[in-house]
Image (spheres, rainbow, N blue to C red):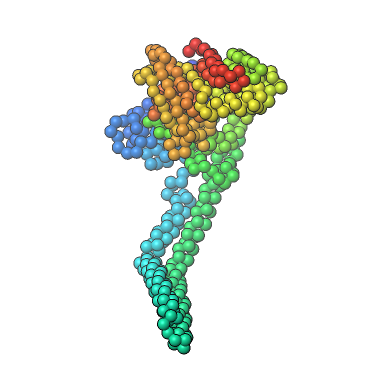
């Protein structure tokens, strides 16, 4: 069998490394050793290649728009047993879909002889015809003539109405004066004359209105001829575009190990998100299946300057996105022996809640790391269920506030709806004081500060959060350094607002502390745990009528 042109043999000796028993679960994984070596070799290529020019924001003074990229490596095995890897990038690279070191796209819309480019030429011809008609001199003259006619009509009507108003005032004044000064017969004659004048004026106004209505209709008809042609062209273009889109959805098809294909349209019910199918993972798997290469392990990493919204660190590994890739990979992985989804396993199975305070009205508990506050989609076990089991008579939502599953520390619970509402009101008014302790994966030079970065959910990659100044909700965090160590910094966080992942994003984002929390598997690098702990909570007890302060120390 001829070696596929994009199969890359390992430069390193991998003979002592055992192949994984199962393929990588792409949405939550620790890269296999072979994936790390493949990624390292690809990064060496990116650092030294001269095949193309792209501004990743890594070289000072480089021209062009800075665009970082997700790259992927897929460790594969040929039927002969040889192990190597494939490389891919998401979207376009250096304004092209294809480069010799990387697998091609699943469907290349940029192929000049492909149906998409041919249909695009037809659509572009429509665009040119529409633009030419919109700028046609005769059409512009007709539009100008209509505008002039409308303006003249408005001016003439206003002038005539004003003159009519003045004439009426004059006639009324004459009637009053005549009634006082003229004989009866002369007064009657004047009344008749003034009435006739008023009737003639009314007839003239009607004639004028009819005249301008006719003139406006004539001008509108001339414009309507062009606008009808324009609308026809736009309707034809819209129909062509819709047909092209549907054809694209059907032609853009993905394979799986069983040889089954499924179109983009079928996967997303004819409503795929923009750029779906252009990420690295689908490209890599498609090429492997087409060339009879067995997928062994997958990893994707970010290369380049961090973007302004989502958190991406240079050379860090990241899972496949959920919005675009998850539906596609759900099909492409059918028939492949894939690692179990760790997100479906209950991480709290052997863990217990510790009560820090408890009375007849409320409780304060220590929530261990990797323990849900409330039930998830796949896992019911949570602080809520454990508490409900312990206090079955408790009513209401119980959980007054939440901690991320990976965050440990103090959680406040209410045993009745009434107490819940009173405690909730304190959180809403921001009178509750919270302090977190976190270990940051780097050295922070300043002693304290405040971070204001608005947050919203990443619609393409839930539950991750984005910094978004346009649609994000305000998020404020105050912080101070507790201790500086050789490679890490211990800090206190004081969240003023309580947005999802607020402290994690504010720590990791370049406009925040630019230093992720140790063990942050979403915005930093995975470790034995997320080193974030809610260690102090101060609130007003609604029944005892006194301030409560609860501490829960941790040894970071």
Choose between 353 and 239: the one closer to the eye: 353
Q: Nearer the viewer, residue 237 or 17?
A: 237
Q: Say above or below: 426 vs 536.
A: below
Residue in the image at 69% along x and 19% along y: 391
Q: Is residue 438 above or below residue 201?
A: above
- Relative image position of residue 64 (x, y in whole percent): 32, 39
Looking at the image, which is closer to me, 223 or 546?
546
Q: Position of residue 284 (x, y in %)?
A: 49, 34
Q: In which quadrant of the rendered view does residue 125 lie?
A: bottom left
* Farthest-out residue, right: 393
17 or 464: nearer the eye? 464
As drawn, the residue found furthest toward the left would be 61
Where residue 34 appears, as percent x and y from the top left, is 48, 22
The residue depicted at 42 percent of the width and 49 percent of the height is: 112
Residue placed furthest toward the bottom: 185
From this viewpoint, is residue 319 visible? no
Q: Is residue 103 above or below residue 385?
A: below
Which image quadrant for residue 122? bottom left
Q: Residue at x 40, y 33 (%)?
A: 307
Total count of labels: 0
**Residue 427 position in % (x across, y down):** 54, 26
Residue at 58% of width from left, 19% of height from top? 545
Query: Can residue 465 be seen here?
Result: yes
């Amino acid at each position: 069998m001829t070696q596929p042109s994009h199969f890359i043999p390992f430069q390193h000796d991998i003979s002592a490394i055992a192949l994984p028993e199962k393929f990588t679960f792409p949405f939550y994984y620790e890269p296999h050793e072979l994936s790390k070596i493949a990624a390292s070799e690809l990064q060496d290529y990116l650092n030294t290649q001269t095949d193309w020019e792209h501004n990743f924001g890594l070289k000072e003074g480089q021209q062009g728009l800075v665009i970082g990229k997700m790259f992927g490596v897929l460790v594969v095995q040929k039927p002969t047993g040889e192990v190597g890897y494939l490389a891919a990038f998401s979207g376009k690279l250096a304004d092209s879909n294809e480069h010799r070191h990387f697998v091609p796209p699943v469907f290349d819309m940029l192929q000049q002889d492909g149906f998409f480019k041919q249909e695009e030429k037809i659509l572009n011809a429509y665009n040119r015809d529409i633009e030419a008609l919109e700028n046609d001199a005769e059409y512009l003259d007709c539009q100008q003539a209509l505008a002039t006619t409308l303006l003249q009509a408005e001016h003439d009507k206003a002038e005539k109405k004003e003159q009519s108003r003045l004439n009426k005032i004059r006639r009324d004044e004459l009637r009053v004066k005549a009634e006082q000064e003229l004989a009866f017969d002369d007064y009657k004659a004047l009344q008749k004359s003034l009435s006739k004048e008023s009737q003639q004026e009314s007839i003239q106004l009607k004639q004028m209105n009819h005249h301008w209505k006719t003139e406006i209709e004539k001008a509108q008809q001339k414009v309507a001829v062009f606008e009808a042609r324009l609308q026809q062209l736009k309707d034809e273009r819209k129909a062509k575009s819709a047909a092209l889109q549907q054809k694209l959805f059907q032609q853009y098809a993905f394979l799986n190990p069983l040889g089954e294909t499924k179109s983009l349209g079928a996967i997303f019910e004819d409503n795929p998100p923009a750029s779906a199918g252009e990420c690295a993972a689908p490209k890599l798997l498609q090429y492997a299946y087409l060339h009879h290469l067995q997928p062994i392990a997958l990893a994707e990493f970010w290369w380049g300057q961090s973007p302004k919204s989502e958190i991406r660190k240079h050379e860090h590994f990241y899972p496949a996105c959920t919005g675009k890739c998850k539906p596609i990979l759900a099909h492409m992985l059918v028939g492949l022996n894939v690692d179990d989804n760790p997100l479906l396993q209950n991480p709290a199975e052997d863990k217990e809640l510790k009560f820090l305070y408890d009375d007849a009205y409320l409780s304060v508990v220590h929530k261990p790391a990797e323990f849900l506050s409330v039930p998830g989609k796949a896992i019911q076990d949570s602080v809520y269920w454990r508490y409900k089991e312990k206090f079955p008579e408790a009513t209401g939502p119980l959980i007054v506030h939440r901690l991320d599953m990976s965050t440990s520390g103090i959680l406040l619970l209410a045993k009745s709806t009434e107490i819940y509402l009173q405690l909730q009101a304190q959180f809403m008014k921001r009178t509750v004081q919270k302090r977190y302790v976190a270990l940051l994966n780097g050295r922070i030079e300043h002693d304290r500060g405040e971070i204001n970065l608005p947050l919203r959910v990443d619609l393409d990659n839930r539950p991750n959060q984005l910094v978004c100044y346009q649609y994000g909700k305000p998020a404020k965090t105050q912080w101070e350094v507790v201790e500086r160590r050789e490679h890490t910094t211990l800090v206190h966080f004081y969240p003023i607002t309580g947005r999802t992942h607020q402290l994690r994003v504010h720590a990791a984002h370049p406009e925040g502390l630019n230093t992720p929390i140790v063990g942050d598997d979403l915005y930093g690098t995975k470790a034995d745990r997320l080193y974030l702990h809610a260690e102090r909570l101060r609130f007003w007890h609604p029944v005892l009528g006194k301030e409560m302060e609860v501490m829960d120390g941790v040894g970071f």
